[in-house]
């Protein structure tokens, strides 16, 4: 299943995160299609293993895109897009990864450390009790809201980006498998097989450390080929397309990657000002 925005030909494919955050990129897809004047495919995930999701994405691109596509993956979707591009390079023109989780296990502990740095007061105390296995029912009620605050800087229009539904079974099955790929090094090996250009866009406030992506790739020589670039957005968390302070800069970078130099720059500036 997919949702289509704008008119054919469709050359941009959005890959949502979660796993299991069904429809979480619908607001982003609509805005991106309007801003770029391009046809956008919102790929909806429905399978319960990483490999089945990769094959599903191949079918979605083959059915709706004419030739290679630019894949834009958010969060876990960044991993899925990269795993897809490693196996099906003929379908991937380029990758744009947003809020990408770390590629090696040793960076995972930094995520909660960074979350704590973004919290204060009782939010931080409740979250620390969770990490120490001392959280009670009252703490659990607070932690969901605390995490939303810790993972973002200043959200805007949150409702238009809410998932249509969340699939907990998909999350549990797929994330367990994906985390194992990271732990045994398979994820990083897949990234290093990718032949197309990769652009990483990460919020400075995002708990996922950007060095968790750039350092493993640099260590393995991937960055030396000049096929990777990273953009760090200030006053921005895990979802740049939802961030009041960073959204304009996010779209300026993104549209610069998607559109030719001959694109009508005043039109792009007009759209960005409306965000």
Image (cartoon, helix red, strand yellow):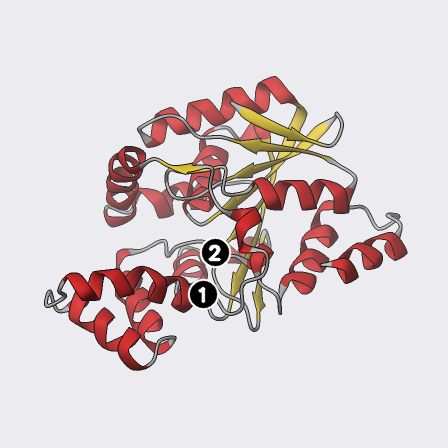
Label for residue 46?
none
Binning the other alpha carbons within 10 Å of mark 1 as few (below 14), some (14 to 19) or many (20 upward) gives: many
Q: Which residue is mark 2?
A: 99
Q: Residue 172 location, x and y as percent?
A: 25, 39
Residue at the (49%, 65%) spot, across then down:
237
- On the question of residue 229 being in view, the answer is no
Q: Residue 202 location, x and y as percent?
A: 52, 61
Whether residue 235 sits left or right of residue 148 in the image: it is: right
Separation of marks 2 and 1 at Cα, in angstroms: 7 Å
Above or below, 45 relative to 117: above
Q: Residue 147 location, x and y as percent?
A: 35, 63
In which quadrant of the rendered view does residue 77 lie?
top left
Q: Which residue is mark 1?
A: 206
Q: Residue 95 location, x and y as percent?
A: 57, 44
Q: Which residue is more in the foreground, 157 or 183?
A: 157
Above or below, 157 relative to 5: below
Residue at the (35%, 44%) spot, across then down:
187
In which quadrant of the rendered view does residue 211 lie?
bottom left
- On the question of residue 188 being in view, the answer is yes
Above or below, 198 relative to 237: above
In which quadrant of the rendered view does residue 72 lie?
top right
């Amino acid at each position: 299943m997919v949702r289509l925005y704008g008119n054919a030909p469709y050359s941009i494919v959005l890959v949502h995160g979660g796993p299991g955050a069904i429809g979480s990129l619908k607001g982003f897809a609509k805005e991106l299609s309007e801003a770029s004047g391009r046809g956008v495919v919102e790929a909806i995930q429905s399978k319960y293993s990483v490999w089945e999701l990769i094959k599903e994405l191949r079918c979605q691109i083959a059915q709706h895109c004419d030739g290679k596509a630019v894949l834009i993956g958010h969060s876990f979707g960044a991993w899925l897009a990269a795993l897809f591009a490693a196996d099906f390079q003929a379908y991937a023109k380029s990758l744009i990864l947003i809020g990408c989780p770390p590629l090696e296990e040793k960076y995972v502990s930094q995520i909660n450390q960074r979350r704590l740095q973004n919290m204060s007061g009782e939010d931080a105390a409740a979250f620390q009790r969770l990490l120490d296995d001392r959280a009670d029912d009252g703490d659990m009620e607070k932690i969901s809201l605390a995490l939303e605050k810790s993972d973002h800087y200043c959200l805007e229009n949150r409702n238009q980006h809410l998932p249509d539904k969340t699939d907990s079974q998909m999350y549990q099955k797929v994330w367990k498998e994906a985390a194992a790929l990271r732990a045994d090094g398979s994820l990083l090996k897949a990234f290093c097989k990718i032949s197309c250009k990769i652009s990483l866009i990460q919020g400075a406030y995002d708990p996922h450390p950007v060095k968790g992506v750039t350092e493993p790739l640099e260590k393995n020589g991937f960055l030396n080929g000049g096929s990777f670039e990273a953009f760090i957005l200030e006053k921005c968390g895990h979802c740049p397309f939802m961030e009041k302070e960073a959204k304009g800069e996010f779209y300026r970078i993104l549209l610069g990657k998607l559109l030719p130099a001959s694109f009508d720059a005043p039109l792009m500036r007009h759209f960005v000002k409306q965000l």
